[in-house]
Image (cartoon, grey):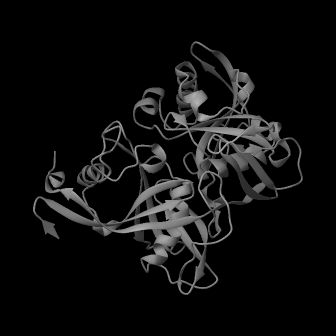
């Protein structure tokens, strides 16, 4: 519909886990990718540090995009493309998936009638175009609609909600084709100005590079304020990320720094310990977790822990020889308990004959708003 100097586009704002995004049906956006991205940037109000002229939330965790289409694949119900909309530049990163936003894809598909709702739980098979992988969401259903209220608590989101089980075992090798992109559980990399550093490069959900916090002079209990204000540490962590990107075959260092900003993610791991949530001050007890983990996302610390990072960390924790496995120690329990800046997230794993066949984390999701977003007609002009 054409109104004055703007076009209206149907959209839905949904919270998925500890992230929030704008959800679109694919056929409601321009077909030309360049024009589509111009329109999306206008929707979000990017580039602008406040995103004051759009729907973006001025934070990487709330500047996210999901484009959903019916799938023609026999092994999937819907096709989903994730976009990380940069706040400070006119750029949308499609290089990776987001586990938190992924948890809202199933409910969105049910609300939109793309998948038939079946009580009490509907399995939605989701093909992610970013990684060319299929994963499953177990969505609770009541009275023919996604159930949103429940007693499941996720740290970093107020209140409770209905449990959504996200099994992303099918995303192993999402970017590089292998769980261990270099073939090794550990590698030594050289960081300019720092020296040698032992890391583990793992690819499940999203590719990641893990390093022990102590090797960076950290404890593993740091909060976002301590890291995000430490410019030297931010640069060191970004150098580790870009060096790993090259070693993993994802991008050369320059491209990783300038264009492929979302992956690999870098996380530093510490021993289980008491610390306080940076959100509400609640004490996370040593005995409640297997280890601490701090995940860097878009060059700042993730305020909780991303869903795909949960999958990757869980898989690394049950892969002998990785720095995560060594930090966790020998455990028979396949529930990996990760202590993140705001609390705890778990990954339920299953290993058969040395192969990871299950990697499940729990989320909640909620539809916040459904309606139209208005975009200037000029956004459709090819540049």
How many numbered dots are placed on residues in this image? Answer: 0
Quadrant of res 82: bottom left
State the residue at coordinates (14%, 56%). 377
- Does the image show residue 36? yes
Q: Looking at the image, which is closer to me, 25 or 272?
A: 272
Q: Is residue 165 above or below residue 236?
A: below
Query: In which quadrant will I find the C terminus?
Result: top left
x and y, in percent, of residue 52 in the image: 30, 45
- Does the image show residue 133? no
* Residue 225 as seen in the image, left or right of residue 65: right
State the residue at coordinates (55%, 87%). 143
State the residue at coordinates (69%, 47%). 343
In this view, which residue lies farthest toward the front? 281
x and y, in percent, of residue 1 in the image: 17, 70
Q: Looking at the image, which is closer to me, 73 or 317?
A: 317
Quadrant of res 354: bottom right
Quadrant of res 202: top right
* Residue 332 as seen in the image, left or right of residue 189: right
* Residue 323 as seen in the image, left or right of residue 208: right
Q: Looking at the image, which is closer to me, 180 or 162?
A: 162
x and y, in percent, of residue 186 in the image: 73, 33
Q: In this view, does 314 lie above or below 47?
A: below
């Amino acid at each position: 519909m054409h109104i004055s100097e703007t076009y209206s586009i149907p959209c839905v704002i949904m919270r998925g886990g500890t992230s929030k995004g704008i959800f679109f049906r694919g056929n409601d956006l321009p077909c030309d990718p360049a024009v589509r991205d111009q329109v999306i940037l206008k929707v979000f109000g990017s580039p602008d540090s406040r995103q004051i002229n759009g729907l973006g939330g001025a934070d990487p965790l709330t500047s996210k995009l999901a484009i959903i289409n019916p799938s023609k694949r026999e092994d999937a119900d819907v096709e989903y493309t994730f976009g990380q909309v940069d706040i400070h530049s006119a750029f949308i990163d499609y290089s990776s998936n987001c586990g938190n936003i992924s948890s809202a894809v199933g409910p969105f598909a049910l609300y939109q009638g793309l998948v038939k709702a079946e009580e009490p739980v509907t399995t939605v098979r989701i093909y992610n175009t970013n990684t060319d992988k299929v994963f499953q969401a177990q969505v609770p259903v009541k009275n023919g609609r996604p159930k949103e209220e429940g007693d499941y608590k996720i740290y970093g989101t107020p209140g409770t909600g209905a449990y959504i089980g996200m099994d992303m075992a099918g995303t192993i090798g999402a970017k590089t084709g292998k769980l261990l992109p270099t073939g090794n559980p550990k590698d030594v990399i050289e960081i300019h100005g720092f020296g040698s550093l032992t890391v583990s490069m793992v690819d499940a959900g999203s590719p990641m590079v893990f390093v022990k916090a102590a090797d960076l002079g950290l404890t593993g209990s740091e909060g976002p304020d301590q890291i995000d204000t430490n410019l030297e540490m931010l640069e060191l962590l970004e150098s580790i990320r870009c060096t790993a990107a090259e070693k993993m075959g994802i991008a050369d260092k320059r491209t990783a720094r300038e264009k492929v900003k979302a992956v690999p993610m870098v996380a530093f791991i510490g021993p289980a310990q008491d610390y306080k949530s940076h959100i509400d001050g609640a004490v996370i007890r040593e005995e409640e977790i297997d280890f601490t983990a701090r995940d860097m996302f878009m060059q700042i610390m993730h305020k909780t822990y991303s869903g795909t990072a949960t999958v990757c960390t869980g898989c690394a924790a049950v892969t002998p020889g990785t720095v995560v496995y060594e930090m966790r120690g020998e455990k028979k329990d396949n529930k990996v308990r990760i202590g993140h800046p705001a609390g705890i997230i778990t990954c339920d794993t299953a290993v058969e004959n040395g192969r990871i066949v299950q990697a499940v984390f729990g989320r909640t999701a909620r539809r916040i708003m459904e309606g139209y977003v208005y975009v200037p007609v000029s956004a459709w002009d090819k540049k």
